[in-house]
């Protein structure tokens, strides 16, 4: 098992806010140097179709983070009635726009629009979400370029806290294209032995219990029970679920899990801030690559 230092009987808290602030500071320093060298700042285009309330909060946070880092953000807010052709046309314009280094299409898209088709239309060199099949394929081939922000954020968080991933056993709960699958690829790249669990996994408690590293990304409040967590494990909770009471909880039963884990991310304040920080980092990296030709 992992070596760790607990505060009493509780897990050490992985402070995503603090680490994200460090990443944003790094990006801001790179932005200043880039601006001095190239006479412009990196640009991020954010496309939000319609007015999904949760999406609006995420988009607002992303725009605020861009402003703080000195990255210029371009907002595009087509209505829910936008046609497939119109949205693809907007993406193509952004692909060609030299001011734009990163393109982010906020998901989910309204019914009737194929998210895969829209995401596939983004220039892979501007795909700062890391969702394009080209970028996923490069990660799978151990040649990462633009990496999916949430999995990349988990890796950076582990690095900042000195959590060694090589030689560990990891369990990823959830197999989405956005988090679960790329998270497994990131952990493989880091030298961990990885199990991916999903709706057809037969004995989820046992798969979680054998893991040194647990990444929960299934979208069900407190589904991962604290009793399943191995002593000393590092737990990264990607879930963000709002209960009827209004309280936000993750996919892991936090209080019970923190009595067994060595490290654990809180919800909110854990993985979430890292996702936005890595989006800024990806945008900066894209700008540098594009400037280098």
Image: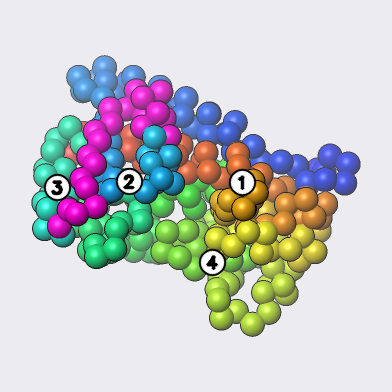
Say which residue appears at 64% left-offset and 37% top-offset. Answer: 15
Return the x and y of residue 125 as percentages of the image width and height: 24, 48
Towards the viewer: 189 or 263: 263
Q: Which of marks 2 and 4 is nearer the N terminus?
A: 2
Circles 2 and 4: CB atoms closer than 8 Å: no
> Can you identify the residue that label 1 sits on?
246
Q: Name the residue at the front extreme.
A: 244
Which label number is shown at residue 51? 2
Question: Is residue 82 part of the magenta span, yes or no?
Answer: yes
Q: Do the residues labelled 4 and 3 touch (CB within 8 Å)?
A: no
Label 2 crowd (10 A; few <14 / some 14-19 / many >=20):
few
Q: Is residue 260 above or below residue 207?
A: above
Cα–Cα gap, marks 3 and 1 = 37 Å
Where does the image place residue 254, in percent across and percent down from the top left?
73, 52
Q: How many labels does the image show?
A: 4
Pick out the residue farthest to the right: 8
Residue plotted at (66% across, 64% down): 223
From the image, state whether disc 4 or disc 3 is nearer to you: 3
Q: Distance between the residues labelled 1 and 4?
A: 24 Å
Q: What element carries label 4?
A: loop
Q: Which residue is drawn at 32% across and 27% down?
A: 71
Question: Which region is colored magenta?
Answer: 61-83
**Label ID, residue 174:** 4
* Residue under label 3: 90
What's the residue at 34%, 63% (across, down)?
Answer: 137
Colour scheme employed for the rendering of this structure? rainbow
- Calculate the distance from the C-alpha at mark 2 to the C-alpha at mark 4: 27 Å
**Above or below, comparing residue 100 to residue 175 in the picture:** above
Q: Could you tell which of marks 3 and 1 lies nearer the N-terminus?
A: 3
Q: Distance between the residues labelled 3 and 2?
A: 18 Å
Give the left or right position of residue 2, taking residue 273 as reference.
right
> Disc 1 on helix, strand or loop?
loop
């Amino acid at each position: 098992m992992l070596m760790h230092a607990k505060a009493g009987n509780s897990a050490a808290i992985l402070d995503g806010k603090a680490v994200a602030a460090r990443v944003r500071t790094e990006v801001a320093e790179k932005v200043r140097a880039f601006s001095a060298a190239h006479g412009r700042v990196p640009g991020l285009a954010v496309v939000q179709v319609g007015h999904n309330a949760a999406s609006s909060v995420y988009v607002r946070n992303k725009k605020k983070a861009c402003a703080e880092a000195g990255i210029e953000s371009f907002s595009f807010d087509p209505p829910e009635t936008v046609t497939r052709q119109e949205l693809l046309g907007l993406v193509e314009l952004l692909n060609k726009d030299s001011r734009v280094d990163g393109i982010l299409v906020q998901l989910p898209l309204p019914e009737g629009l194929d998210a895969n088709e829209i995401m596939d239309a983004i220039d892979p060199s501007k795909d700062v979400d890391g969702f394009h099949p080209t970028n996923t394929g490069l990660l799978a081939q151990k040649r990462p370029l633009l990496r999916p922000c949430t999995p990349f954020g988990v890796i950076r968080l582990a690095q900042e806290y000195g959590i060694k991933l090589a030689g560990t056993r990891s369990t990823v709960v959830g197999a989405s294209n956005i988090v679960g699958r790329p998270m497994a690829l990131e952990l493989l790249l880091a030298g961990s032995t990885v199990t991916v669990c999903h709706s057809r996994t037969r004995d989820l408690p046992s798969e979680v219990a054998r893991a040194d590293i647990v990444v929960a990304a299934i979208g069900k409040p407190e589904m991962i029970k604290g009793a399943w967590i191995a002593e000393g494990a590092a737990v990264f909770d990607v879930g963000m679920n709002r209960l009827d009471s209004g309280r936000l909880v993750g996919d892991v039963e936090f209080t019970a899990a923190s009595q067994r884990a060595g490290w654990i991310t809180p919800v909110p304040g854990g993985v979430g801030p890292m996702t936005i920080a890595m989006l800024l980092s990806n945008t900066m990296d894209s700008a540098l690559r594009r400037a280098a030709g």
